[in-house]
Image (spheres, rainbow, N blue to C red):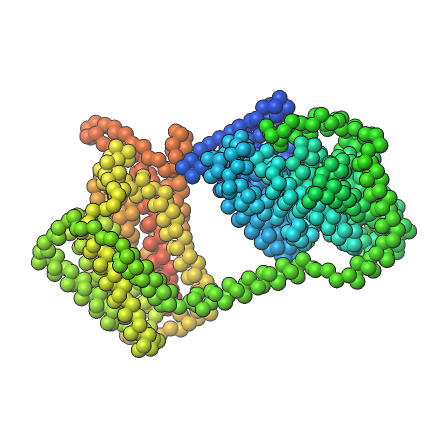
Amino acid sequence: MSLFFIVALPFFGALLPGLMNSAGRAATAGVTFTVTLAAFIGLLTNLPSVLAGDIVMARVDWMPLLGLNFSLMLDGLGFFFALLILGIGLLIIAYGRNYLSRDDNMGQFFTYLLLFQGAMVGIVLSDNILLLLVFWELTSLSSFLLIGYWKHLPEGRQGARMALTVTGMGGLAMIGGMLILGQIAGSYDLSVILQNRELIQADPLYVPALILILLGCFTKSAQFPFHFWLPHAMAAPTPVSAYLHSATMVKAGIFLMARMWPVLSGTPEWFAIVTTAGLITMVLGAVIALFKHDLKALLAFSTVSHLGLITMLLGTGTAFGAMAAMFHILNHATFKAALFMSAGIIDHEAHTRDIRRLGGLRKLMPITFIVASLAALSMAGIPLLNGFLSKEMMLEEANHTVLFNTPWLVPFLATVGSLFSAAYCFRLIGHVFLGPVRDDYPAKPHDPGAGLWLPPAILVVLVVVIGIAPFLAEPFIKLVTASVLGEAAEVPKAYFKIWHGLVPALYMSIVAVIGGLIMLAIFRPSLRIWDAMPRPEAKVIFEAIVESVAKLARAIILPLHNGAFSRYAAIAAITMVAVGYHAWSTGTIAAPTRDMQPANAVAIGGWLMLVAATAGMVMMHRNRLLSLILIGIVGLMVSVGFVFFSAPDLAMTQFTVEVVTIILLLLALNFLPNKTPIESSVLRRVRDTSIAIFGGLATFALSYHYMLRDAVTAPISEFHLANSYKGGGGTNVVNVILVDFRGFDTYGEIIVLGIAALLIYALTETLLGGPVRARLLNRKPDQKRAGNQHPMMMVVLTRGIMPVVLLVGFYIFLRGHNEPGGGFIAGLIVSIAVVMQYMASGFGWASARLRYPYHGVIGAGVLIAGFTGIGSWFVGKPFLTSDFTYVRIPPFEEFELATAALFDLGVFLAVVGAVMLSLESFSRLARQAGGPESEHAMEIDPSRDDPKEQATKEAV
């Protein structure tokens, strides 16, 4: 199966659980399981190529100029992690089906899970670091949704915010590191970067890039000092904890360190930072885990400890350390996922995770006891279980690692970490399952159905099989190790076996196990010492830092960003004028290269009218209706200016926009006072006037000097003029720019226009559904209204104009590609025609004859424009690339057919829908304010109101 399908399946599959939610829990879980199984099988179809040592590649250029391509790579390392993500994902889905209660929204849960799954698969299969960053941030967002799934729990919301904050900040740092790395290597493709070890490590920016990338890895994989977020994420449902914190999210940082190992490892900086962070995390996490009473908290800190173990192995920079890390990733995924699911079973059946309230469950829950005990013993490093093998390899590597010129430091700390690891594993078994049966459990514990215990049992089978026959896993782990090492080192010759003789690692392991038993024996006095010890609380420190940053932000932002637009405008204007004056006074200005054009009387007259209207608006702006009239005059004079400068497209657009805007603003003014109150002091008005004058003079000076000189570089208009017909098939350059060269901008603009109209509609619905409705119904007009609001002459005139305007709009639409016009202008013209019907006959009459809702018109326009752009993909062209041809159908002359016309149709519909929906929203408010409307088109109709006519109709 193509790598694109493997990555895309979870994302597209995320649409299904919500749709199947009403079909029942089994259907929802079943469709989720099927999607994951399909991706899993698709991954396995590439297994022969991976086993043969090949690298499966897939690539589609996305934004090649930015270096962002949708390129995927499947080698041994990517296959290994994808196998864990999808394989354990199948077990988690089956487990979650039986774990979640009937009150939980299963469709929502599995939607989040599939989104997270797709993001994780995207990370491990990405061959482009920019694409990897996209998936990286998606894991942060989707994990936020999963951790905070139980929204009713404050600790769930807090844990989700903490995880998003820490991993998000690390992700921002990693973006910087990745960009530096790509610049050094000259490419953002991993397959290229991994071939440039010497170039990258010799570059002076290697250390900054390394630190930034490691910040992202450490925050994601909960390494010291960022380890605190993971335990707080345990407020999530147990299936989330088992999935995110055993095989997926927390392994993302580990994966990236392994992926970058060939180019970043082997330097003193890598060794010191990664090994030290891993060792501290390993020991600290193990010590804290021992004294946790919450079963999931114990497992969370144990996860932190084992992630530190893997990080330390990768930090040593040796091939054997990398191989041991890969082996422990596999082992940790099996026994830790099984333990989390076992903890969930206990919580599900006993209604508590507090170890102090448990004990004696061996007799009550024998199946859970066997599954959890085998997984815990593996985590403790007991022989004949897989955890023992990778722990021995870790201790062997630690024994040969010298840190800070101290040969005993790493072996000692590794042994201490293993000792506490064994201790909390023994405590888990002893304090939860052993001992006498209690009579004060919150609920009567018993083994659940197979739906809950079978998924962890499958993982425990792997724990035992690998532990007894490690040679079964050896070829695959060495294949994965070869992908990690690349060309930087050879795969070690070491064999995976249970007995390696009397080696130092064995003695260190014996010390750890015996020490763990001793710690369990002295646990109670140790707990009293631990409770009495003063120690920093990471959660308190984090919250204090967040609060301090928030206070600093408020101290800086609130005085500036206080909601006063006049202050923002004043600061911006003063800054721009000051910066412009500095550039003017210190720079050099070339001599003018253009002559002033003579101004005729018409131009001067138009300019004087524009100045007069603008000055009048400034002087009389408190009269809202008069201001609106003056604004209209200004807009019309700007349209005349466009005509004068031979820009008919802009003139038509400006004119039609002005008409529609004035109508909408007149409707809005119906709900505002006639006069704007005086709120500014005299001093403030003097200040604003001075700033406006200086800003205007500066703009005039800049425009004047710019227009007298040629541009420094060739304007882009030359490209548009040269390629409008050749590339876009149209002679109207403005329209070709809108629907072809800048089609993506236009597409975004019609979406924004539609959203604005929908927001106006939503606000209207809110107003009409709240207390404002009563005020509108009781509103009394301040002036006497005309007795005939819909006069006959207005109705007759608009009925006659309607088809003519529609024909004009149709004509303007068709000619737009080669003559002034187009979908936007045509949409405004048609909108004016429809608006006139509302004005003539009222909202009630017009809306009763509405066949298509304006929401649907907007949506149809956006969809038509979007599908037109997507169509270019099928011929191997970028999104929204237009095509055209010429056809001849007798008896007509030859004419052009262009895909841009379909895109322009989408623009046309979106504009009509947005304008009319806005108008309809304001009209509904006006209708509520004015009371009931007549259902007739005219207030006075002789044929309807004449008694003789009425008698004649009744007689007939």
Q: Residue at x 83, y 30 (%)?
A: 501
Q: Is residue 311 left or right of residue 640?
A: right
Q: Nearer the viewer, residue 394 or 725?
A: 394
Q: Quadrant of the C terminus?
A: bottom left
Q: Quadrant of the N terminus?
A: top right
Q: Is residue 715 left or right of residue 339?
A: left
Q: Which quarter of the figure has residue 10?
A: top right
- List x then y, in percent, for residue 749: 36, 49
Total tally of numbered discs in the picture: 0
Vertical relation: 100 (above or below) 47: below
Q: Is residue 798 left or right of residue 139?
A: left
Q: Which quarter of the figure has residue 464?
A: top right
Residue lying furthest left: 601
- List x then y, in percent, for residue 3: 55, 30
Vertical relation: 360 (above or below) 330: below
Vertical relation: 400 (above or below) 360: above
Q: Is residue 256 left or right of residue 520?
A: left
Q: Is residue 243 visible?
A: no
Q: Residue at x 75, y 62 (%)?
A: 534
- List x then y, in percent, for residue 204: 51, 41
- List x then y, in percent, for residue 402: 71, 40
Q: Nearer the viewer, residue 130 or 454?
A: 130
Residue lying furthest right: 436
Q: Residue at x 39, y 55 (%)?
A: 756
Q: Is residue 598 visible?
A: yes
Q: Residue at x 39, y 51 (%)?
A: 752
